[in-house]
Amino acid sequence: TRFEYDKAGRQTAVVENGTPVEIEVEKKPLSRSGRSTLRMFQAGKTVQEIAMERGIVENTVLEHLCEAVQNGQTIDLNRIVPRSRQEKIVAAFKSIGMAQLNPVRESLGEEFSYNELRIVRAGMNAGLTK
């Protein structure tokens, strides 16, 4: 088995007979708290503003947004990770693979956060990145 990417950047496994099979990402239902975070983000609030207003940490806001993307919601990733950084992250995932964050972070360096990697990977799986 080897891994390839479709035009949307989604990872597929190519099994021995050459047939590509899309890798399924486990979907968790979006919690009430996650829906609240998503509504605020869609209304134009930043990750930092949402965290302050809701009394939660930014990491939780980003987890909610990742869950939303994994559940089919479309968000503007450019508001979270600048396009130039997304491009580097996408290239690293395509080169190294989508399964683990650590090798990708080691490749990119500590200037890239795990939160950036998670949200971009969710966007890749949902076809939100190029």
Image (tube, rainbow, N blue to C red):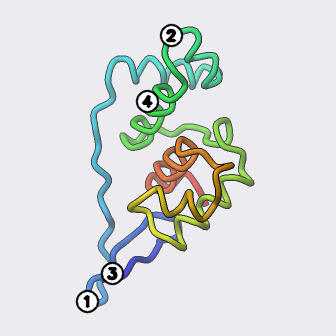
SS label for mark 3:
strand
Q: CA distance from mark 1 to mark 3?
A: 7 Å
Q: Which of disc 4 and disc 3 is earlier in sequence?
A: 3
**Which residue is tagged 3?**
14
Q: Nearer the viewer, mark 2 or mark 1?
A: 2
Percent coordinates x, y for residue 57 in the rendering? 51, 20
Q: How many marks?
A: 4
Farthest residue, direction right = 84
The reply to whether callout 3 and callout 4 are in contact (CB within 8 Å) is: no
**Which residue is tagged 4?**
64
Percent coordinates x, y for residue 128 in the rendering? 54, 51
Q: CA distance from mark 2 to mark 1?
A: 49 Å
SS label for mark 2:
helix
Q: Is residue 101 left or right of residue 77?
A: left
Q: Which of disc 2 and disc 4 is earlier in sequence?
A: 2
Q: Disc 4 residue type?
A: His
Q: Disc 1 residue type?
A: Glu
Q: CA distance from mark 3 to mark 4?
A: 31 Å
The reply to whether callout 2 and callout 1 are in contact (CB within 8 Å) is: no
Asked if 98 appears above or below 110 in the picture, the reply is: below
Q: Is residue 30 left or right of residue 61?
A: left
Q: Nearer the viewer, residue 56 or 78?
A: 56
Q: Which of disc 3 and disc 2 is earlier in sequence?
A: 3
SS label for mark 4:
helix
Q: Disc 3 residue type?
A: Val
Judge the density around disc 3: few (<14), some (14-19), many (≥20) Cα neighbours within 10 Å: some
Q: Which image quadrant for residue 44?
A: top right
The reply to whether callout 1 and callout 3 are in contact (CB within 8 Å) is: no
Question: Which disc is residue 54 wearing?
Answer: 2
Q: CA distance from mark 4 to mark 2?
A: 13 Å
Q: Disc 2 residue type?
A: Arg
Asked if 69 appears above or below 60 in the picture, the reply is: below
